[in-house]
Every structure is written in C-alpha cells, then in structure tokens.
Image (tube, rainbow, N blue to C red):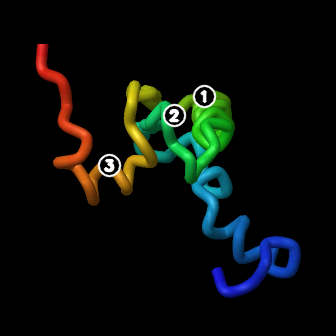
Amino acid sequence: MGEPQAEAAEVYNEASSISHVDRNGHSALLIDGKIDAIASVKNSYTLAVELKKASVQYTYDRIDDRPHLMVFFANHRAYPLAVS
C-alpha cells in the first residue's frame, strides 16, 4: 500500500473486502490452505461473519496440505490435487 497501516488506515480500510460487504453484495467463495503462512484464517473468518450478518451467500473451505491460494496457483504442479 506504500505506507504502514497505522499511517494510512483509511487506504487499508478501503482496500479491505470487509469494508464493502452489504446485503446487495454478490455471493463469495472463501478458501484457505491449512498450511498458509501468508494470511491468517482469522481474515476469512471475519469476512464470513460479516457476510452472514449481511445475509450474503458464501461458501468457506479450508484445504488440507495447501499453502496460500496464490502460491498454490503459481506453483500448482508442486501441489497436485488428490483425485479419489
């Protein structure tokens, strides 16, 4: 964001998905990798709580043995999906 969060709280709040939740919002898909070292599961949980309060449909899932989702997509061959 270019500045520490403490110095640019308004910019950080505007960039946050939670700041844009309202009852007219679109449904959401929230996915966490259980070995995510980048983003806290608390972020998805907090967003899910706000979506529920606003009566917005959402699906939340945590995937075993997967890192942060963007890392997973960037390195998808390193994390093959199990097919059963």
The residue lying at 37 percent from left, 55 percent from top is 71
Secondary structure at badge 3 equals helix
Residue 76 shows up from this direction: yes
Q: Which mark is residue 52?
A: 1
Q: Does the CB distance between marks 1 and 2 fall below 8 Å?
A: yes
Occupied quadrant, residue 10 = bottom right
Determine the secondary structure under disc 1.
helix
Mark with earlier residue (1, 3): 1
Q: Quadrant of the N terminus?
A: bottom right
Residue at left 86%, top 80%? 7
Circle 2 SS class: loop
**Mark closer to the observer (2, 3):** 3
What x and y, as percent, mark residue 19? 67, 56
What's the residue type where badge 2 is placed? Val
**Which residue is disc 2 drawn over?**
56
Let me know if residue 27 appears in the view. Answer: no
Q: Quadrant of the C terminus?
A: top left
**Mark pair 1, 2: CA separation:** 6 Å
- Asked which quadrant contains residue 12, the reply is bottom right
Q: Nearer the viewer, residue 66 or 46?
A: 66
Sooner in the amino-acid sequence: mark 2 or mark 3: 2
* Residue type for callout 1: Lys
Could you tell me residue 44's position as x and y percent?
Answer: 58, 39
Q: Residues within 10 Å of mark 2 (few under 14, many from 20)?
A: some
Image position, residue 57 (x, y; %): 45, 30
Residue beneath label 3, please? 72
Q: Quick check: 3 left or right of 83?
A: right
Real-space Cα separation, disc 2 to disc 3, in angstroms: 27 Å
